Image (cartoon, helix red, strand yellow):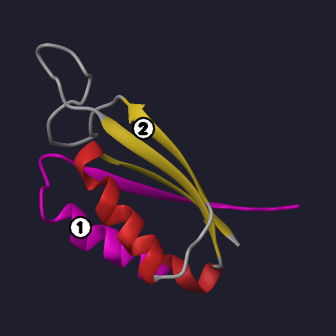
């Protein structure tokens, strides 16, 4: 089992949910407004007058065998609007109840 943290442009919400549905990933936690900027490029998302866009974030726990397929689907989505941004970070899940 792996934990995947996803930070994405808010407009990607429905597309991310569609990826979860396609991969039969049911449970997730969602934050509707998160702020940040990319490490290398892209526009900042601060929710301010100068930088009005915002991100959203997801935390999802998935079976290890689904991680690569999830990441590949997220990569394809990111490529549709690279300046807006989408990042996913995979972490181990050591215990779950």
Secondary element under disc 1, as helix, strand or loop, is helix
Q: Residue at x 12, y 64 (%)?
A: 80
Q: Is residue 58 left or right of residue 26?
A: left
Q: Dividing the image into 4 quarters, which one contains the N terminus? A: bottom right
In depth, the one of 21 and 51 nearer the eye is 21
Q: Is residue 81 left or right of residue 61?
A: left
59 is higher (above) or lower (below) than 96: above
- Residue 46 is tagged as none
Q: Earlier in the sequence, mark 2 or mark 1?
A: 2
Point out residue 63 in the picture as x, y percentages from the top left corner: 65, 78
Point out residue 14 in the picture as x, y percentages from the top left corner: 32, 60
Q: Quarter of the image holding residue 77?
A: bottom left
Q: Is residue 2 left or right of residue 11?
A: right
The span shown in magenta is 68-97
Secondary element under disc 2, as helix, strand or loop, is strand
**Residue for badge 2:** 32
Q: Residue at x 14, y 55 (%)?
A: 82
Residue 94 colored in magenta in the image = yes
In depth, the one of 72 and 11 nearer the eye is 11
Q: Residue at x 21, y 15 (%)?
A: 48
Q: Quarter of the image holding residue 53?
A: top left
Q: Residue furthest top?
A: 49
Residue 78 colored in magenta in the image = yes
In depth, the one of 11 and 60 nearer the eye is 11
Point out residue 32 in the picture as x, y percentages from the top left corner: 42, 38
Q: Dividing the image into 4 quarters, which one contains the C terminus? A: bottom right
Q: Marks 2 and 1, Cα distance to the nearest angstrom?
A: 18 Å
31 is higher (above) or lower (below) than 26: above
- Residue 77 is tagged as 1
Q: Residue at x 33, y 54 (%)?
A: 13
Q: Residue furthest right?
A: 97
Q: Quarter of the image holding residue 27?
A: bottom right
């Amino acid at each position: 089992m792996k934990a995947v943290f996803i930070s994405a442009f808010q407009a990607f919400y429905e597309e991310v949910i569609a990826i979860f549905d396609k991969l039969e990933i049911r449970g997730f936690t969602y934050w509707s407004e998160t702020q940040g900027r990319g490490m290398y490029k892209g526009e900042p998302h601060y929710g301010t007058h100068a930088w009005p866009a915002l991100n959203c974030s997801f935390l999802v726990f998935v079976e290890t065998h689904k991680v690569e397929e999830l990441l590949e689907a997220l990569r394809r989505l990111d490529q549709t609007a690279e300046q807006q941004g989408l990042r996913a970070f995979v972490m181990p899940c050591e215990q779950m109840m």
